[in-house]
Amino acid sequence: MASLVANHVANIRVIVRHGRVQSESCFQPSLRAAAKERQQEMQKAAIDRVKLIFALLDADGTGYLEAEDFELMATRVIAAAPDSDNATKAAMLAAFRRYWTTLAAELDANDDNRISFEEYTACVLSPERFDTAITDFAEALAALGDPDGDGLIERRVFVALMTAIGFERANIDALFDAFGPSDADQIMVSVWAAGIKDYYHPEKTGIPGDHLVGGPI
């Protein structure tokens, strides 16, 4: 009798174990599908962000990014920061130029000295290839917004720089507010620099930078 009971218990364990394995194997495809869908959603959000940047950087409206676009944009942005010193302005100009030369070196496969939007999407699909250039750009732009060097950026300066780039005022204010300004209506330089870098990363969703695109946060 004892042996019959033991065999019965063993059979139940086998059934339960097999059932668990079957359940897990049934869930695996759906989990993989959900993960893939999530990855695609993140990539789409990031591509929407750089789509806006591409349109703004395309200063002459040709549908391509060229060296002249970055020179024009640098001129506009620097002009919007009259209180910054020459070294900070020079760093901004150098960052814009490095941004372009990095794009050209990485993406201009046919050597036509211009970058299409399809090529530009590599900024988010392979962000590691552009980390250094984006970091330089982010830090230079954030520093430009801090002419007195106290590590803080006032809303009026932030608005002036972002307007020079081409963003809409409502979106600019929404972004500034998302950075958590102080009672004096200032944000930290480091917070803005980090926000710029986050903007280009596909794994980042629900970030302050999404306010610039105007989509849901």
Image (spheres, rainbow, N blue to C red):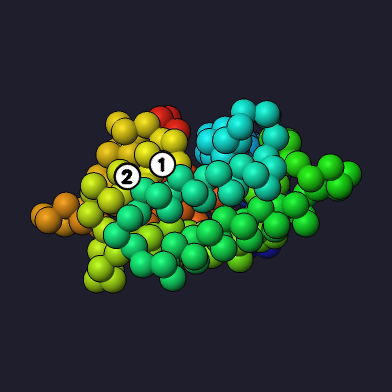
In which quadrant of the rendered image does the C terminus lie?
Answer: top left
Disc 1 is placed on an element classified as helix
- Residue 85 is labelled as none
Along the line of sight, the residue nearer the viewer: 9 or 138: 138
> Where is residue 30 shown, x and y percent of the image?
65, 37
Horizontal placement of 113 versus 6: left or right?
right
Q: Residue at x 86, y 47 (%)?
A: 111
Kindly check if marks 1 and 2 are in contact, taking CB atoms under 8 A apart as contact.
yes
How far apart are the two marked residues, 1 and 2, measured between alpha carbons?
Answer: 6 Å
In which quadrant of the rendered image does the N terminus lie?
Answer: bottom right
Q: Residue at x 79, y 45 (%)?
A: 113
Around disc 2, counting alpha carbons within 10 Å, would you say few (fewer than 14), some (14 to 19), or many (20 or more)?
some
Q: Residue at x 70, y 35 (%)?
A: 64
Residue ID for mark 1:
164
Q: Residue at x 62, y 57 (%)?
A: 97
Relative vertical location of residue 113 with respect to residue 196 in this rendering, above or below: above
Amino acid beneath label 1? Ala
Residue ID for mark 2:
160
Along the line of sight, the residue nearer the viewer: 107 or 45: 107
